[in-house]
Image (cartoon, coloured by chain):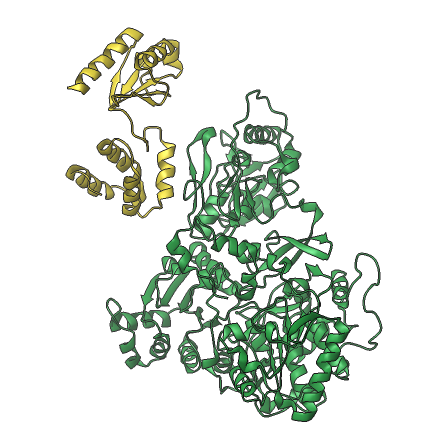
Chain colours: A yellow, B green
Amino acid sequence: MRFSDSFESRFTSMLGHYPTKRSVLVPTLLYMQDELGYLTDEAIRDIAQRLELTELEVRNVISYYSMLTTRPRGKYNVQVCRNISCMLCGADDVIAHLKKRLGIAHKGTTADGMFSFEEVECIGACSWAPAMQVNYDFHEKLTPENAEKVLDEYRRKGSQ
Amino acid sequence: MPDVNITVDGKKLAVPAGTLLIEACKSVGIEVPSFCYYPGLSLQGACRMCLVKIEKMPKLQTACTTVVTEGMVVSTEIDEVRQARKAMLELLLANHPLDCPVCDAGGECELQDMTFSYGAAESKLIDIKNHKDEQQWSPVVYFDRPRCIMCYRCVRICGEGMDVWALGTANRGSAQLIMPNHSDYLECEECGMCIDICPVGALTSGAYRYKTRPWEMKHVGTVCTHCADGCKTTLGVRRSPTGMQIVRGDNRDKSGINGDFLCIKGRYAFDFASHDHRIQQPLIRREGRHVPASYDQAYEHIALRLKEIREQHGGHAIGVIGSTRTSNEESYLLQKFARLLLGTNNIDHHRTADFPSFAGALARKKDATASMRDVFNAPAILLIGNDPTEQHPLLAWQIRNNVRLHRARLYVVNSSPIKLRRQAASFTQIPAGSEPQLAAFLAGDDSAANALASGEITREALAALRDKLRGEPNLIIIFGSELRGSSIDSLVRFGAAISGAKFVCLGDYANSRGAADMGLYPDLLPGYVPVGSGARFHEEWGAPVPTEPGMNLLQMVDAAKAGRLKALYIVGANPVARYNLDPFALSKTFIVAHDMFLTETALLAEVILPAANAYEKSGTFTNTCGDLQLLKKAGDITTVKSDFEMLLRVADRLGFDLRQLVPFRQAERADLGQSRGAQSGEADRHAIWLEAHGLEPKLSPFDPIAMLDEIQRLVPGYDVSRVELLAGNDQHTSIEAGVASSIASQPELILPANDTLFTSGTLGRYSRTLNSVIENPRRAPADKADREVVV
C-alpha cells in the first residue's frame, strides 16, 4: 500500500526503537489513520504483513483504543469529555447543545462529512474543564455558546 | 536450581527457585483458585482469582504471576483473601447469565464450582445484564458471549499451543469479547482445544451441545482410532436403544501421552460408530444380493467353504488381509488363524511405512526408539519428510511445544514448506522424492548432495547441517514413509554415531505399527521374525508354522485373478479402494469380510460379518512410536461383535481347539459373563467388567488379555509392565535384539494414507462431523480443494 514518504521514513526509523517488531504497531496505526482518515481493511492487511502479525491481532489492538477507528469519520472529529471534572463544570450542557446543533448523536457523523461527534472519557484537561478535543487540538473552558463558535470556525476552515 | 524456603498458611516448604507461588501452594495441597492460569501457557494475570496476602507487600498479589522468594510468608485463607475472591466472582458474574440449567458446562464448570465454594451468586447490581446471542463460529465451535469470563485460555491455547492464532480479544472493559479470525466465523484447524480448555460454557462443541448432561454419561478413557499417534480420548457414553452410544469425545483425562492435546478426529470423529449405514447383522450373498443372515448361518457358511477350499486346494489357495485398525490381539490372532488353522503365510495388510526395514536396521540396538513422550522432552529433533500437522497432529503438538517450552532445536527437512518450519531452528527444502539421497548424504555419502542442492540449499549448507546434527546428543530422528528399505539403514547408521539418538518411523492409521509388530506379513512372524526361523512360535503353538513366505497383498490379487487364490479372508480393510484394485480380479474368489460398512471391498464379499470398531472393544494398540496402550470398551451396539470373537467362532466351526489359539485358562465354560443386569451381554463386556474391578480375566476364549499374555511372551520388545498397562498408562515397546538384521522388505507395497487433518480413511468418510468441516461453505474454495477427501 502506498503511503507518504514521511510516513515511510518515520516507520523505518521507528522499527529500530523497539526490541520487537510488533511494538511499533500502535504509533504506526495512528499515523496511518492520519493519512487515510480511518483504518481501512487494506491498511490493516498491510500493517499485519509488515509486522508479521495476524490481521486478527491488528484488529484486536484497534478495537482496544478509542482513538483508532475502522469506520470513516468526519473531517473534524469532535470529542467532548464527560468525565467527572468536566461533568461538574457543565459538560452535559455542552454535549446536549452540540448534538442538537450538529444534528447527530454520539459517534455520529454529519451528512456533509464535516463533523463527527463523540463523548469521551478524561482527556487530561481537568484544570480547564469542560474541555473538548477536535482532531489533535484542545478547546477549553467551554460553554454551549463558545463551543458552537469553535465549531463554526472549523466549518468555515473546512469549507474553504 | 537451589531451593527457596517459604511459608504458606503456616506450612513451611522448600521449592525450587523460579517456581510460581500458585504451583508452590499446589505442591503442598493448598488450592489457590484461578481461571486464567493454566500450566504450560503464558502467564496472563487476567482473572484476579488467585489473589493472596504476602507479608510486607502492600496489596494482595496474584499467586499465578508471583515467583517465590526466600522467606516469603503467604496467607491464602484469611478473610481479606476470601473477601477478594468473593468480590472477583461477583464481578465475573455481573454479566454472566447464570443459565447453568441449560448450559453444556453445567456440572463441569469451574465458575460454578468457584461460586459454590465462595458464594457470590447474589448480585448487588440491578442493571440489566449485557446479552449477546450465541454464534456458530464453525461446524464444531459455538460461542456464547455472555458466559465468557475473559480468561484468555482459548486465545493462548490456539496461538501458543496450536500455532493457529485464530482467536483474539476485541474491545475492552465490559464490552470486551473473544473474537474469531474472520470476525464472525473461524478458519482454523478445528481442534476444539478452545472448547476443552474453556473453564465455563462460553465455547461449546457443535457435536455435543444440548445433547445430554455430563452426569448422565459414563466416561471411558480409551485410545483414539484415527491416526497413528495414539492419543487418549475420553468418550462419554449414554444408554441408547441399541446399546451404548458415544455422545462426546474430549480430553478430561489428561493422563494420556497427549496431555492437553486432542485434534478434531479424536474429539469429534467418533460419530462414524453410529452412522446409519453401519452393518448391524451378518450378510450372505445369495443370487447376487446381500441378504441378512443369522450369525450361526454366517459362521457355518464360512467354515464350510474354507474347509472345502483348504482340503481341495491346500492352505496356499487361501489369503488373509488384516487391518490397521484392529487391536494387537486381533492382528496376532488373525495371523495365528492364518498360519496355524488355514495353513498359509498368505497374509498381509495395507502397509503405510516400512516397519520391517526399520526393525532390521535397529536390530541389536538397545533403546533406539523414542516414545511420544520423549518427543516432548528431547533437546533436539530432526524431522525428515511427512507433514505432522496434517498427518500426525499429536506429534506436531509435541514438537511444537517442546520447542516453545523447552527450547528444543528442531531441524526440518522436507520437500514442501510444512507448517512446522515455523518452529524450526533450520528448515531445508529439498526436491520432492530426494529424501533417500538425504539419508545417504547424512550417512556420509557426499555424492548424494548433488540431488539435494538447489538454489539456497548449497552443498556447504547441507554439510553444515550434517555437522550440526552430529553434534546434537540425544537427537530424536523422525522420518516419514518417504524413507524405505536401505534408506532407513543409512539413516540409522547416521544416528548410530550420535550418542543417545533415537528414532521414530511414521506410519498411518491407529494400529499400523501394531499390525506390523504382530506379523501381518507373508514373510514375517510377530516381532519381525522371518517365517523360516519361527522355532519359538512353533514350540508355543504346538504345531508347525509354514516356513515358506506367502504371497503379499498384490501377489494375492494377481493369484486371485489367475484363479489360483480361491479364498480371501479380509478383516477391517479396504484394499480395493486403497490399492485401486480391479474388483473383477476378485470375482472368482470366495471372500469373507469383517467390516462396519459396505466398502468397495466388503461389497465383493460372499459373507460379511458386522464388526465392532476400536471404541467398542478392549485390547491394545501400538502407536507409531511403539507406545502400547489399553483400549477400553466405550460404545456398544448389541448386534455387532469384535473381530476377535468372530474369528474364534469361525475357528470353532472349523473344528479347531480354541485353547491352541488363545491361551485362556482351564474351563472354557467357566464364566462367559453375567446373564442379567447392567453388565449383561457378550463375553467382551465380561472382560471389561473384570478389568474395571482390577481383575485380569483369562477365563474366556474371547478374552483379548489372554492373547496379550502370549504376545508379551513371544513378541520381542512387548514385555512391558502389565500393571502399568492395565492401569491405563502407555508403555513403550521396543524393536530390538533377536531380530534378523536383513529383512527383505518390499518398499513398493507401501502406500501412505495421505490423510489430512479432516480425513481418516473409511472412518472419515462416515463421520458427519469431519464431512461438515470439509464441506463448510465458509472455507475458502482454494482451501477446500486442498482438502479434497480421499477415501
- Which quarter of the figure has residue B172? top left
Q: Is residue B452 above or below residue A1?
A: below
**Residue B61 seen:** yes
Asked if residue B261 can be seen in this view, the reply is no
Q: How many marks?
A: 0
Residue B267, compared with residue B658, is above or below; it is above
Depth check: give the residue in front, B275 or B711: B275
The N terminus of chain A, quarter of image:
top left
User: In this view of the protein, which residue sits in the foreground, B351 or B113?
Assistant: B351
B730 vs A157: above or below = below
Tell which of B613 and B354 is nearer to you. Answer: B613
Looking at the image, residue A32 sits to the left or right of residue B475; the answer is left
Residue B467 image-quadrant placement: bottom left
Instruction: Give how far across and how far down residue B456 sits, in percent.
Output: 24, 66
Q: Nearer the viewer, residue B445 or B64?
A: B445
Which residue extends farthest front?
B287
Q: Quadrant of the C terminus of chain A?
A: top left
Q: Could you tell whether A122 is left or right of B661 in the image?
A: left
Image coords of residue B381 (percent x, y): 42, 66
Residue B423 placement (x, y as % from top left) = 38, 58
In the rendered image, residue B686, in percent from the top left (x then y), is placed at: 77, 65
Give the quarter of the image for residue B599.
bottom right
